[in-house]
């Protein structure tokens, strides 16, 4: 299924898509249909297209309501992020047991606790002496564990909840590293008037590169390839978009 969303910036359009579809921002890939930079006498405008393999949880006809704050639901998922690292219900305990079980089946030991709780998202932290192995090259092992955990959560009847796994603050460190990479590559292509093709990345990492460089007038980005892990090409445009 295909949905279209609009916003003043790419980030705003993606935020509206995630809100309307009931998904995490790294659950879907985005195609930029139209991008108009803001100027002195005009507002910015971005239109995106989202492709899904299943129906959305919330009808996109209501995307205009994305800017309105939603009250937090009653129950354990309305609690603050770090106040209660222990499981607060059977669902959270099942997820913790499932994650710890996967780590053991990999041949390692680790303990799992709740990292944060949000309306449609819950994060878990894995504490282990083998965190580097659990993360894997470019986070691929951690992404795989996260994917399996989300599948398990769906089988528990909680497809509305997005599960995020982290260990040793890898997600934050990865984000900071990608932002630095984006600016470094942008400087390189502006200097040589060429292009650079980055390593294959998951949708969240690619979107971070696109968003970071979105406001640099003479640099453009686009995703290339097929499948989940596509590559981002950063290239010189030589002037305003």
Image (cartoon, rainbow, N blue to C red):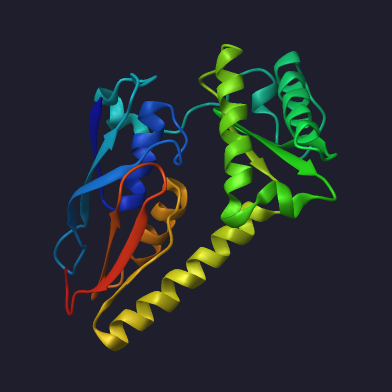
Seen in the image, is 13 located left or right of residue 4? right
Give coordinates of residue 42: x percent, y percent: 15, 61
Which residue corresponds to the image point at 50% horizontal and 72% vertical from the top-left?
180
Above or below residue 75? Residue 149 is below
Image height of 156 relative to 222, above or below: above
Q: Is residue 47 at least partly visible in the picture?
A: yes
- Residue at the outermost left position: 41
Quarter of the N terminus within the rendering: top left
- Which quarter of the rendering shows the C terminus? bottom left
- The answer to which image quadrant residue 117 occupies is top right
Residue found at x 40% / y 76%: 185
Residue 210: quarter of image: bottom left
Residue at image location 76% in from the left, 41% down from the top: 126
Q: Position of residue 80 (x, y in %)?
A: 70, 35
Residue 76 is situated, as x and y percent measured from the top left of the image, at 70, 22
- Image position, residue 103 (x, y; %): 76, 35
Q: Nearer the viewer, residue 106 or 88?
A: 106
Relative to 202, residue 78 above or below: above
Q: How many marks?
A: 0
**Horizontal side, residue 182 vs residue 78: left or right:** left
Residue 81 in sight in this render: no
Image position of 183 (left or right of 123): left
181, above or below 20, in the image:
below
Residue, far top: 157
Q: Residue at x 35, y 21 (%)?
A: 56
Q: Between 196 and 19, which is closer to the camera in this rendering?
A: 196
């Amino acid at each position: 299924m295909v949905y279209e969303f609009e916003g003043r910036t790419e980030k705003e359009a993606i935020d509206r898509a995630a809100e309307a579809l009931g998904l995490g921002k790294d659950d879907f890939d985005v195609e930029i249909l139209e991008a108009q930079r803001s100027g002195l006498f005009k507002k910015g405008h971005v239109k995106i297209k989202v492709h899904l393999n299943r129906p959305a949880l919330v009808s996109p006809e209501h995307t205009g309501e994305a800017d309105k704050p939603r009250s937090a639901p009653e129950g354990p998922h309305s609690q603050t992020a770090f106040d209660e690292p222990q499981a607060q219900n059977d669902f959270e305990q099942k997820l913790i047991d499932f994650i710890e079980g996967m780590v053991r089946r990999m041949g390692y030991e680790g303990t799992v606790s709740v990292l944060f709780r949000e309306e449609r998202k819950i994060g878990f932290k894995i504490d282990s002496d083998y965190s580097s192995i659990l993360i894997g090259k470019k986070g691929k092992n951690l992404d795989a564990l996260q994917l399996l955990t989300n599948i398990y959560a769906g089988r528990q009847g909680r497809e509305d909840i997005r599960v995020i796994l982290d260990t040793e603050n890898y997600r934050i460190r990865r984000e900071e590293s990608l932002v630095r990479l984006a600016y470094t590559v942008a400087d390189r292509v502006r200097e040589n008037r060429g292009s650079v093709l980055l390593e294959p990345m998951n949708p969240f990492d690619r979107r971070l590169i696109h968003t970071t460089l979105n406001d640099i007038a003479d640099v453009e980005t686009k995703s290339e390839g097929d499948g989940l892990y596509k590559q981002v090409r950063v290239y010189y445009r030589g002037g305003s978009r």
